[in-house]
Image (cartoon, helix red, strand yellow):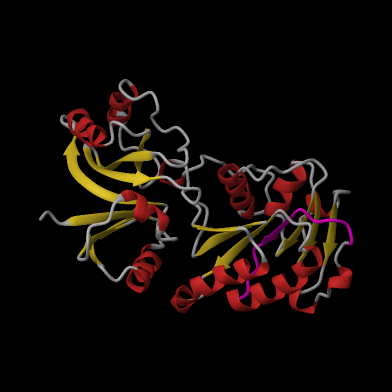
């Protein structure tokens, strides 16, 4: 019986978090290869297919799947055809990427583009993705993934969003990525409460969309946000804030990016959000992994949102994240 290997790409610097998550929640997988942004594991248990893996994909994997084969530039198209033949009756896309973000060369991409019109398109739920990962110049790994609603639909999670020069912080990228991935359906004049708003990266994105924002943060906001008539600043630590100080108007979205340990930030934000529990469409909550102990609590964090009434809870690492991940609770 051939050994089965699982590949996982991750944000460079988060390899240790990915490996610890695998150790905790995927006991049949043992470490096989570890490099910057790419880790593979040998499956010592029963073989699993791409659909099962997609349903329980590691949170700290930008993309995970079944490793199929290694190839080189000369054999790339022939070997890729062997893989696509395995799923010939299924819908599939092809994603070509390098774990460092840009291909070492354009040779592989040019070859694939001439053969596969669906190259690097946004993945659609319930289709397969054939991942062509350029490991070094002219050397490729090919792996197979399945797409669910909780899958980042872009090649290696790269939404190609660039931080604009007017953004006060990189938090702009997090909310912009979430909007592009999940299609948040932000409407003009929606009201958002943002916990941990300073200095205003995410606020800038939301205000540029025409939304009204209430920012909760004891620190100062960038003047471009503070002077915007659609912004109100509650310069109070979240743990000292009462529901009475929050707006009485309906709130459509709550975003959270607090520099607190997850247990405390979850407790305080959900306490406050009860005021708008009947109004909100979603909560975007950034979980900071202060230490690896918090990885043991991931299931508990997710359950808090289910118990709060969310109809769907998605956990995902974004390409703009550091040692953190996103919980998106839909209502």
Tell me which secondary structure the magenta stretch mostly adopts: loop
| Quadrant of res 4 | bottom left
- Let me know if residue 258 is in the magenta part: yes
The answer to whether residue 11 is seen in the rendering is: no
The region drawn magenta spans 248-261
Q: Is residue 176 left or right of residue 252?
A: left
Q: Is residue 58 left or right of residue 310?
A: left
Q: Quadrant of the C terminus?
A: bottom right
| Quadrant of res 80 | top left
Q: Is residue 180 left or right of residue 242?
A: left
Q: Nearer the viewer, residue 287 or 172?
A: 287
In the rendered view, tell whether residue 272 sits above or below residue 71.
below
Residue ID at (64%, 63%): 257
Q: Position of residue 159 (x, y in %)?
A: 51, 41
Q: Residue furthest left?
A: 1
Q: Nearer the viewer, residue 137 or 261?
A: 261
Q: Position of residue 13 (x, y in %)?
A: 40, 61
The answer to whether residue 16 is seen in the rendering is: yes
In the rendered view, tell whether residue 90 sits above or below residue 182.
above
In the rendered view, tell whether residue 159 sits above or below residue 48.
above
In the rendered view, tell whether residue 7 sits above or below residue 265.
above
Residue ID at (70%, 65%): 196
Count of labels shown? 0
Residue ID at (80%, 56%): 251
Q: Nearer the viewer, residue 20 or 205?
A: 20
Q: Quadrant of the N terminus?
A: bottom left
Q: Position of residue 117 (x, y in %)?
A: 38, 23
- Let me know if residue 127 is in the magenta part: no
Q: Position of residue 74 (x, y in %)?
A: 16, 29
């Amino acid at each position: 019986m051939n050994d089965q290997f699982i590949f996982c790409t991750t944000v460079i610097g988060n390899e240790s978090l990915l490996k610890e998550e695998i150790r905790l929640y995927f006991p049949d997988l043992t470490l096989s290869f570890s490099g910057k942004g790419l880790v593979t594991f040998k499956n010592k248990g029963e073989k699993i297919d791409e659909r099962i893996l997609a349903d329980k994909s590691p949170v700290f994997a930008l993309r995970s799947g079944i490793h199929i084969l290694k190839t080189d530039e000369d054999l790339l198209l022939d070997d890729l055809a062997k893989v696509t033949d395995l799923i010939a009756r299924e819908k599939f896309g092809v994603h070509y990427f390098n774990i460092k973000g840009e291909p070492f060369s354009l040779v592989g991409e040019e070859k694939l583009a001439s053969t596969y019109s669906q190259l690097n398109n946004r993945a659609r739920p319930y289709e397969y993705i054939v991942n062509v990962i350029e490991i070094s110049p002219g050397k490729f790994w090919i792996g197979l993934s399945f797409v669910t609603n909780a899958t980042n639909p872009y090649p290696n999670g790269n939404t190609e969003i660039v931080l604009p020069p007017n953004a006060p912080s990189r938090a702009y990228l997090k909310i912009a990525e979430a909007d592009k991935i999940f299609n948040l359906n932000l409407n003009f004049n929606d009201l958002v409460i943002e916990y941990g708003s300073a200095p205003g990266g995410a606020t800038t994105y939301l205000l540029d969309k025409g939304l009204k924002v209430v920012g909760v943060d004891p620190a100062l906001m960038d003047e471009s946000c503070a002077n915007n008539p659609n912004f109100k600043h509650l310069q109070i630590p979240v743990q000292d804030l009462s529901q009475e100080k929050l707006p009485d108007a309906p709130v459509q979205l709550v975003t959270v990016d607090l520099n607190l340990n997850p247990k405390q930030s979850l407790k305080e934000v959900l306490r406050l959000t009860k005021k708008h529990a009947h109004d909100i469409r979603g909560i975007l909550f950034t979980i900071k992994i202060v230490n690896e102990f918090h990885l043991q609590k991931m299931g508990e964090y997710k359950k808090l949102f289910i118990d709060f009434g969310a109809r769907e809870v998605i956990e995902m690492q974004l390409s703009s994240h550091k040692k953190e991940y996103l919980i998106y609770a839909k209502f």
